[in-house]
Image (cartoon, grey):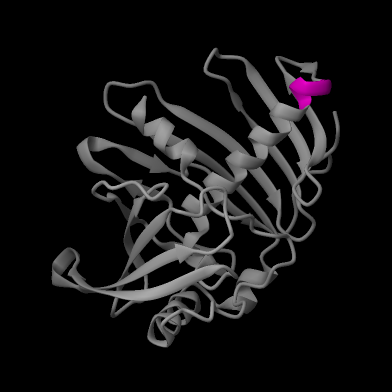
Amino acid sequence: MRLVAAVLTLAAWPLCAQEPAAAPPAAASDPKAVALAQEVLAALGGAEAWNATRFLRFDFAVERPGAPGFSRAHTWDKWTGAYRLEGKTREGQAFRVVMNLNDKQGQAWLDGKALEGEELKKRLEGAHAAWVNDTYWLLMPFKLLDPGVTLALAGEATGQGGATLDKLLLTFAGVGLTPKDKYWVFVNRATKQVERWEYVLGGRDEPPTGWDWKGWKTHGRIQLAPERLGKDGAKIHFPVLEVMDAVPEGTFAAQ
């Protein structure tokens, strides 16, 4: 499944538990691009609302016509780094990981069996990589002003209904799992909402891959969009998407 492979290699940098949403921009960033990113953050609810958001519960799901579906379930305490991941392997085995993202320590189970040694290490590393990838698909607009991100304006485009879209180019300096990636973020000039993104991974010389962002609505104190629509009917979406003030007791317990 090429789509799943692309999803699993698309990288972001860690969203640290205590990290503010509006960090100082990279010195090389275009001030006008920084100003646009600040307007995007304000439209999403603002830095204060993002920093006050604690628990996120979401399913990351991939669909492609004629191919098996794929999903995994995340629960994340953004303040402490506590994290739970559940899903199935390609072989259909159920897995569960409970860890802290700050020190990457935790426990994991495969078909109910506790893992140890190298198996545990690989499962924890895989869970961290899944979190990096899947949270960026969900939360990228909140990360525009992160340290290591260089922003530039890249022209205009036309969106749905003839809307004018401003294009932000994101490049990275020393951050992320694949810092050679490039992203173009298409921002509706009137609403400041992200309507689309395109990316080229790993510095490759190839046309960008694009996805439309759909369904913006309020979750807790912030705005989130649950759908990414690609070409040929491909879809990445978040069928479960909740912002919570508390989670059930034992969610992050080693059990």
Q: Residue at x 42, y 43 (%)?
A: 237
Q: Nearer the viewer, residue 244 or 253?
A: 253
Does residue 136 appear anywhere in the picture? yes
Q: Nearer the viewer, residue 151 or 85?
A: 151
Q: For the N terminus, which image quadrant?
A: top left
Q: Nearer the viewer, residue 41 or 253?
A: 41
Name the main secondary structure of what is drawn in magenta: helix
216 displayed left or right of 176: left
The quarter holding residue 21 reads bottom right
Does residue 241 appear anywhere in the picture? no
Q: Residue at x 48, y 60 (%)?
A: 140
| Residue 105, placed above or below residue 192 | above
Q: For the C terminus, which image quadrant?
A: top right
Q: Nearer the viewer, residue 218 or 183?
A: 183
In the image, the segment drawn in magenta is 116-120
Q: Position of residue 76 (x, y in %)?
A: 69, 49
Q: Position of residue 201 (x, y in %)?
A: 39, 47
Q: Position of residue 222 (x, y in %)?
A: 54, 68
